Amino acid sequence: MISHKHYLLILALVYLFFWFALAIDPVDRETWALENALPVIFVAVMLVTYRRLLFSRLSYTLIFIFLCLHTIGAHYTYSEVPYDEWFTALTGNSFNELMGWERNHFDRFVHFSYGLLLAYPIREIFLRVADVRGFWGYFLPLDVTMSTSMIYELVEWGSAEVFGGDLGVHYLGTQGDVWDAHKDMALASLGAVVAMTVTATVNAYLRRDFASEWVESLKLKHKRPLGEDEIVRLWRKKE
């Protein structure tokens, strides 16, 4: 089997080639630059930390796919990705008409993919760094996916307020839907639910201790109340 280092290098080179190819003549250069701000920071953090936190090949593959999808959205702007034209060229039929859609849904697809593709790498962090087990190994990745999806919607809103004009409209990408942010968050959550359900199903099939670990993770570990009682205890200990 190919080593982690070589596998990561191959993914990185393919992604860089893809990114640079789509960086040439994007539909809107300002929107492209704004859309790429977070991915550039994300990739930089991964490069800095990869020696200390080397993900599995599966996690790297899922992250790679998500970044590629985002790169496509940034090149065309999410509301103008011509997936319907591509589908029509291949099949002779309109995908939007088949689905009964009136808007461009590429942004919704990527929000769903965010939960579907990144919940597992997030779970890997929780298992390896926080040493969570059982129920919490599935709930916490879902929780983080939902909360970061909400934070991204706030970032979109703030950016639209700051930049305004066409740049703000393109970045926000609501396409006239007042519930766009809510639907985006719901789809990201749904993607994470699917990812964690599949992961739990595989683990339940492969691991004999799956049920016992799940039950143990939900047991009360410390019977003594915390909160103000813990503050008093720590204060007295300090004295």
Image (tube, rainbow, N blue to C red):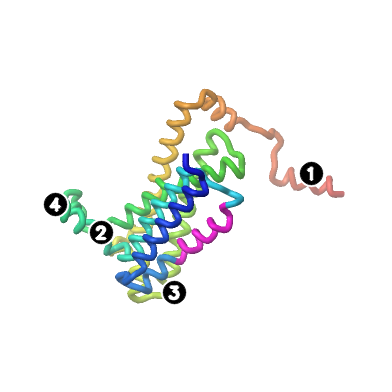
Instruction: Give the side of residue 111 with respect to residue 151, left or right.
Output: left
Q: Which residue matches tag 1?
A: 233
**Label 2, on which residue?**
104
What's the CA distance linking mark 3 and mark 1? 47 Å
Question: Viewed as shown, does residue 184 lie left or right of 98?
Answer: right
Residue 48 appears at what percent x and percent y?
Answer: 57, 58
SS of the residue under disc 2 = loop
Distance in Å between CA atoms under marks 2 and 1: 58 Å
What residue sits right under mark 3 in the picture?
A: 162
* Front disc: 2 or 1: 2
> Measured from the top left, where is residue 215 in percent x and y?
56, 28
Q: Is residue 120 visible?
A: no
Q: Earlier in the sequence, mark 2 or mark 3?
A: 2
Is 63 a magenta residue?
Answer: no
Q: Nearer the viewer, mark 3 or mark 4?
A: 4
Q: Residue under label 4, please give it.
A: 93
Majority secondary structure of the magenta segment?
A: helix
Which stretch did the figure color magenta? 37-50
Disc 4: CA contacts within 10 A as few (<14), some (14-19) or many (>=20):
some
Q: Is residue 128 visible?
A: yes
Q: Position of residue 167 (x, y in %)?
A: 36, 73
Q: Amino acid at mark 2?
A: Asn
Residues 182 and 31: in front is 31
How far apart are labels 4 and 1 at the CA level?
A: 70 Å
Going by the numbered disc 4, the residue's amino acid type is: Asn
The amino acid at mark 1 is Arg
Q: Residue at x 50, y 39 (%)?
A: 138
